[in-house]
Image (cartoon, rainbow, N blue to C red):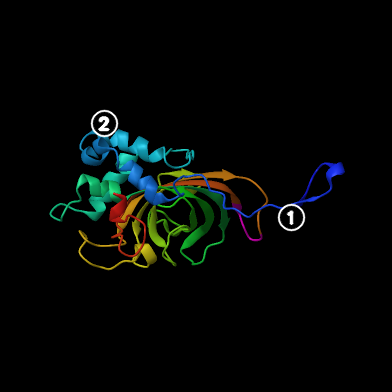
Amino acid sequence: MMYSLDPKKRRRVRKRPQVEGLESRELLSYGALLAAVNRTPAITQAAFSNAAAQSAYMSNIHQNVSSVQVGPNGITPFATAIQYALHKLYPPGDPQPLPHEVVRQSLVVKITGEYIVGPPRFSDQSFQIAIKAQGTSNQSFKQWALMSVFFPKNTAQGTITGLMALHPKNEDITGSVLELDLTGDPNHLFHGLPTHFTWIADSASSGAYFNNSGPISVGNGMGAGTIDVHYIPGGSLRNRATGGGRVAIVIQGLVASAGVNGSIQVPTTH
């Protein structure tokens, strides 16, 4: 029921219910994003066959995720991260992924958040870093992450280690988590904090990334790559914290997902 706006015609105006159409558009889905990437035959067929193809693919991927500036040592070149992952996952003599499979497994995550430096957990550690961040990736438009880093008292005898959990918030399989085991590079530090890591996927990964421990050529949940971190110190410190501020992170590499238990890397999008 509605009333006329004309004060001289104060009468009820009846309106019949009707259905209004919505605009036609694709849903915000990483499946559509990956399909768009792979509609480029020159990139799909020639990926990593030469330097020009690597550069083209890197540019295509990075245009599909938000821009994050990482320093002071910058971001690892995408081709370098992929070559590290290929060497780690597919050593000579094992079945090698074809170019389009490399494209399908490629992972680029760009997230921002906050970090806190706090006291160590064990006697052989100097301090720990806790990071909470969120952003986007080429596999999930909404990416949430938790990261812990443990710095040894002596980098000559100990290793910078860590663990990261990546949660794809718009994945259709409940409990999808990609767990990453981190190793920090002691030669890349910013005010004593590690800025460069390599990673391999942990067997604790679940959901779309569950590890089935099968042959690597048909396996699931296996991955490797690099992480670059930029710290922006500042702000008030929490109780017992010795440092903190904002953080920007770029994760790159390969991660295998069979696509049979989730919408990440399903064959129909390729």
Please identify the dominant SS of the magenta region: loop
Residue at (33% x, 46% y) in the render: 35
- Indicate the secondary structure of the residue bearing disc 2: helix
Q: Left or right of 56: which side holds 243?
A: right
- Percent coordinates x, y for residue 53 in the rendering: 26, 34
Q: Are marks 2 and 1 in contact (CB under 8 Å)?
A: no
Above or below, 204 relative to 32: below
Task: For the N terminus, give its image quadrant.
Answer: bottom right
Residue at (24% x, 35% y) in the render: 42
Residue projecting furthest to the top = 52
Q: Which residue is mark 1?
A: 1
**Nearer-the-camera pick, 212 or 186:** 212
Q: Is residue 254 visible?
A: yes
Residue 38, picture quadrant: top left
Residue at (53% x, 55% y) in the render: 131
Asked if residue 242 lies in the magenta stretch, the reply is yes
Q: Which residues are magenta?
A: 239-243
Residue 45, picture quadrant: top left
**Nearer-the-camera pick, 111 or 124:** 111
**Which numbered mark, 2 or 1, is in the foreground of this view?**
1
Q: Is residue 152 visible?
A: no
- Percent coordinates x, y for residue 107 in the rendering: 36, 49
Q: Left or right of 93: which side holds 28?
A: right
Residue type pointed to by label 2: Ala
Q: Left or right of 192: which side holds 186?
A: left
Residue type pointed to by label 1: Met
Q: Which residue is mark 2?
A: 52
